[in-house]
Structures are given as C-alpha cells and as structure tokens.
Amino acid sequence: MNFKNARVNQKIPFVQDICKTKNVLDVGCVGQDNDFSSEAWVHKHLKSVSASLLGVDINKAGIEEARKLGYNILHVDELKDKTFDVITMLDVIEHVNDICQFLEYYSVYLERGGKMVITTPNPFNVRQFFNILLFGLPSINPEHTTFIDPINFKEISNRLGMEIDTFCWLKEYDQPQKLYMKILQSLIFPVFRSFRKHFEANYAVVLTKS
C-alpha cells in the first residue's frame, strides 16, 4: 500500500460513492454530529444514495431523536442476524476499547466480498505538530482511547483475515474555531501537506471480506 502517493479525498463524497445502491449498516451514526440537520451528519447523506440504510449506536437518547426524524436506527442490542454489502464506521474506532475485537464483532454482519469503510483521525496530522510546537501538547479528544496510523491497518487486516481494498487520505473536516489555527490551516498547513501527505488530517481504509 503506497501511503505516500495515495489520493486525498473529501470524506462524504468518498463514502457516498462506496455506499451507492448498496445495503448499508452505519455503525456509530448518532455520534457523527450532534445536530441531525447539519450537513456534517454523514448518515443523512448515506440515506440519499444507498439502496437501504440501517444505523446502529449506543446513544439511546440520540437514537430516539433520529427515529422521530424518520431514520431507521437501532441500539446495538437490537441488531439482528442480517448481512450488509457495506458497513461504515466513520470516526468510531478511536473511541472503542479493543479495535480488533470491535471490527471482528461487526464483520459477521458483512456479506462475503463486502466492504467495511473506516475513517479515523491521522495521529501525525500537521495540526498536532504545531500544537506540540506552540503549546507543548497535542490536541486530544478526551473520549478517544487510541490513535492508529494507517500502516497499523496492515496488521489489523491480517489479524481479522481481511484485505485492504482501498486507502486514501481525507481532507480536514473539523474546522478550527480559534483565529491563529484558522490562519495556520489556510496558509501554513497546506504547504506541509503538499510536501508530505502523512501530514493530512484524516484517512479512510476500506477492508474487504474474502
């Protein structure tokens, strides 16, 4: 897998393209955004392109709110024996206790030949470099349990008996709030990212079940 020369995509169009006309299970869909009317809520965009879409989450209050808006979302305990063409896990794995166990659990719901789409923050994002340089510490979401470099997915896929079908970098989709970070993101970060793609903000891995 050539990480140095991998393409850089926008998150939502990339995931939509894989889910188009497919039967999709969207894992952790409630947590994609706190505002279900937001354009950042990916589940809404997947519904517009997939043949069928089922969401699953552990946030009971969020599930009920989304159901009132017409979305088909279950609590993880309600998930039945059904298989899907595509399973999406968008910015989820960095929150779980055991990544391999988590992926293995959901792999039983994936059709043979199906695709598991995983997005997650890049631990070597140039933004982290500047946070350490300027403030002495990286910026860490306290709800995250781990960071995973894309190279680690080679080992993860081997342990799961799955293959890496596609890899790409993803452009920044968390917009900075502070002025100094907005300036860095608009003027400085693109220079670093054009020089080394491993400075990109996020990435996506697509695993296939053989």
Image: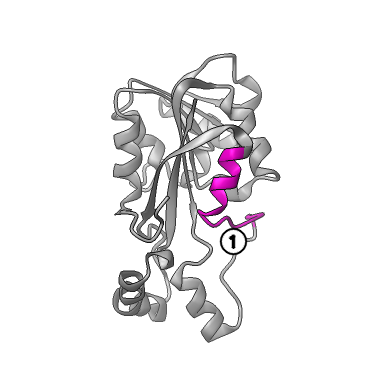
Q: Does residue 58 appear in the picture of this structure?
A: no
* Residue 33 screen position, x and y as percent: 46, 47
Span of residues in magenta:
143-158
Q: Which residue is mark 1?
A: 141
**In the picture, residue 137 is in which quadrant?**
bottom right
- Counting the numbered discs, the total is 1
**In the picture, residue 199 is in which quadrant?**
bottom left
Seen in the picture, residue 118 relative to 147 is either above or below; the reply is above
Query: Is 21 inside the magenta-drawn segment?
Result: no
* Residue 174 screen position, x and y as percent: 42, 60
* Residue at image location 31% in from the left, 54% down from the top: 7
- Element type at mark 1: loop
* Residue at image location 58% in from the left, 73% down from the top: 138
Query: Is 156 inside the magenta-drawn segment?
Result: yes
> Which residue is nearer to you in this view: 99 or 32?
99
* Residue 203 screen position, x and y as percent: 43, 53
Seen in the picture, residue 7 relative to 186 is either above or below; the reply is above
Horizontal side, residue 71 vs residue 56: left or right: left
> Which residue is nearer to you in this view: 144 or 34?
144
Horizontal side, residue 194 vs residue 87: left or right: left
